[in-house]
Image: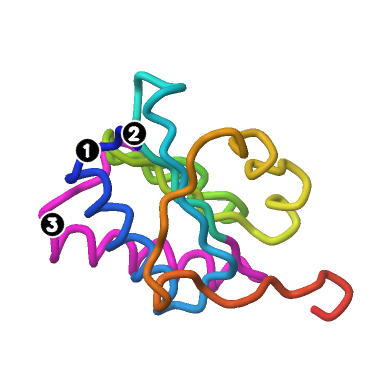
Amino acid sequence: MTATDRALELVKVAAEAASDKLAQEIIAYDVSEQLVITEAFVLCSAPSDRQIRSIVDEVEDQLRIQTGAKPVRREGERDGRWVLLDYADIVVHIQHEEERGYYGLERLWKDCPEIDLPENARGAERTPLDEQ
């Protein structure tokens, strides 16, 4: 892996914050070999727009409190179905379950090394859409 220690620290804090708000299937990838604009992606999802907003707020709060990081860009807030938080070193994607299934970011980045997350930062199992 070639992501910096700073990027790995941000990934861990973001993943733990998302997990605290019950984000589902949190995955992180080291994309530093593929992209020059960022070093890592954090992907997670939730079954409702309200929960997505809660995850976004917690990720932003914890990254600011624990690391002093503030997003340089924030997209998708109005629709609340896929919010992207860009911290330059990392990008956090918080998607509605349907968008995650449709866009399949895991398939796009599966060739990149997965960043090992602590047990408390992996999130809940994804909810099958027919059970929601």
Query: Residue sitting at 44 percent across and 77 percent down?
Result: 21
Q: Name the residue type under label 1.
A: Thr
Q: Percent from the top left, x then y, of residue 81?
A: 62, 54
**In the displayed structure image, the side of residue 61 where residue 11 appears, left or right:** right
Vertical comparison of 54 with 74: above or below: below
- The residue sitting at 37% across, 70% down in the picture is 118
Q: Which mark is residue 4?
A: 1
Q: Secondary structure at mark 3?
A: helix
Quadrant of the frame with the C terminus: bottom right
Which residue, given by chain and number where applicable, does mark 2 sit on? 39
Q: Is residue 105 above or below residue 79?
A: above
For the residues labelled 1 and 2, say whether their Cβ atoms are less than 8 Å apart: yes
Q: Which residues are magenta?
A: 45-73
Which of the numbered marks, if any, corresponds to residue 67?
A: 3
* Left or right for 22, reference 99: left
**SS at mark 1 in the image:** loop
Residue type pointed to by label 3? Thr
